[in-house]
Amino acid sequence: MNENTAQHIEKPPAPDNKFDRQIQILDRILNWKAKNGLRSPHFWIIVIVMLGFGYIYYNVLKSYHDLYIILFFYPMMYAAITYRLRGVLISGIAFLAIVIPHGFLMEHDAYAVVRTLLFAIFAFLISSLGATLLNYLERQLESYREIVYLNQELNKYIDQLEKMQRQLIQSEKMNALGELSASVAHEINNPLAGVLVYSKLLAKKVNNEVINRQEMITNLAKIENAVTYCSNIVRSLLDFARQTEPSLKPVKIPDIIDQVMTLVGHQAQIKKIKVVRKEENPLPPVMADFAQIQQVFVNLVVNAIQAMSEGGTLTITVTSKDGFVRTAFTDTGVGIKPEHMKKLFTPFFTTKSEVKGVGLGLSVSYGIIERHSGKIEVQSEVGKGSTFTVVLPVSTSEK
């Protein structure tokens, strides 16, 4: 089972408490079944009851034997519960052996014999039906227990799969973080160099007691801006790296894009890639996990930048229609070959060199968007560029 096929698996519901009580009662009844054959106490209970009723039938009851013959129905049902069909057959034979002689030898009444036989057939059919029903319920209970066991195992596998998915998402995030860190180091080097220059200049002027208040304020403001700029980049990097539990909240797509461009915008500048943003105003929020959607967007933007090694234009277009927000990332890069289109979201498939990726970015992104009840659409033409469009449903509070 891979990540993509696991998105729609749901945990089985817990059984109802009332249903559980019914199962427990049925289980107790089915547990009366004899397991030791003739060595079971059930066998001797049936024998004693049959002999006792036979004694009563012959020696105690002086009339209405056709009515009191119903006494033998109880040990037959007991035999049906404890020994099932074989118990019904044996107890039925014992029943006939006890009552038939009475009709032939004592009453000399053909009608009484016929009535006895008819009742015997009726009792046998009812007991057989009861035994058959118990056998059926026993098989159903075994099936139910097996289903419960399989559901418990399925829950364990689902929990393991969800844990593996979170680990995979974090692993891919760390991989992206490694690429971002190298470029961020280059990005913050220039402002830090400026901070160093202005701080040395201020220290020199203070030592020489050459202090121009306005110039000092201006230089300090430049230092503050540079430090704030570096701080924002580092904070964004830390937020991106932080592992948190998924939390769906109403978020604005432009806010996510702002955060993404803080992380990777300088990569585009280094490669002389122009970034164009087109956004509808106003845009409804989407119900999403900010960090996970940010991870998807970072992956798509980095892929677009890497596809334009000689410069180009990255256009990010955000629109809303029919209850969905569509975020399209369009580059003017090399494009994707038609034979690779169907493999884009397959784990470990990549068209990059080994040092640039292992083919998990798009697969993980696909899984994240599916869990958000959205989709990723791809259009590409070799030599002209590609467009990856992330479609996410609008927050329900906004519909």
Image (cartoon, helix red, strand yellow):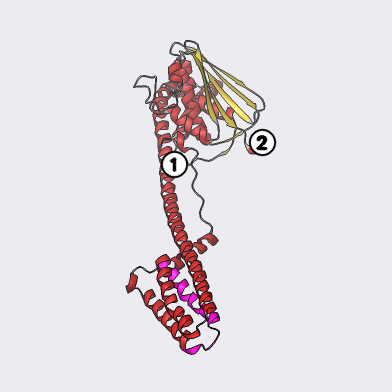
| Badge 2: residue crowd in 10 Å (few <14, some 14–19, many ≥20) | few
Residue that numbered label 2 is attached to: 398
> Can I make out residue 158 in this image?
yes
Q: Nearer the viewer, mark 2 or mark 1?
A: 1
Residue 69 in magenta stretch: yes
Tell me the amino acid under the disc marked 1: Glu
Does residue 209 appear in this view? no
For the N terminus, the image quarter is: top left
Q: Nearer the viewer, residue 129 or 337?
A: 129
Extent of the magenta region: 59-84
Badge 2 amino acid: Glu
Sequence-earlier tag: 2 or 1: 1
- Residue 219: in magenta span: no
Q: Quadrant of the C terminus?
A: top right
Q: Going 53% across and 83% down the picture, which residue do you hit?
A: 65
189 relative to 56, above or below: above
Q: Quadrant of residue 64?
A: bottom right
Give the camera-side residue of 78 and 20.
78
What label does residue 162 carry, if any? 1
**Structural distance between the alpha carbons of marks 2 and 1:** 29 Å
Residue 41 percent across, percent down from the top left: 36, 76
Marks counted in the figure total 2
Secondary structure mainly formed by the magenta segment: helix
Compared with 13, 375 (above or below) is above
Identify the secondary structure beneath mark 2: helix
Which element is circle 1 on? helix
Q: Left or right: where does residue 375 sit relative to residue 280? A: left
Which numbered circle lies on residue 179? none
In the image, residue 103 sits, relative to residue 299, either above or below, namely below
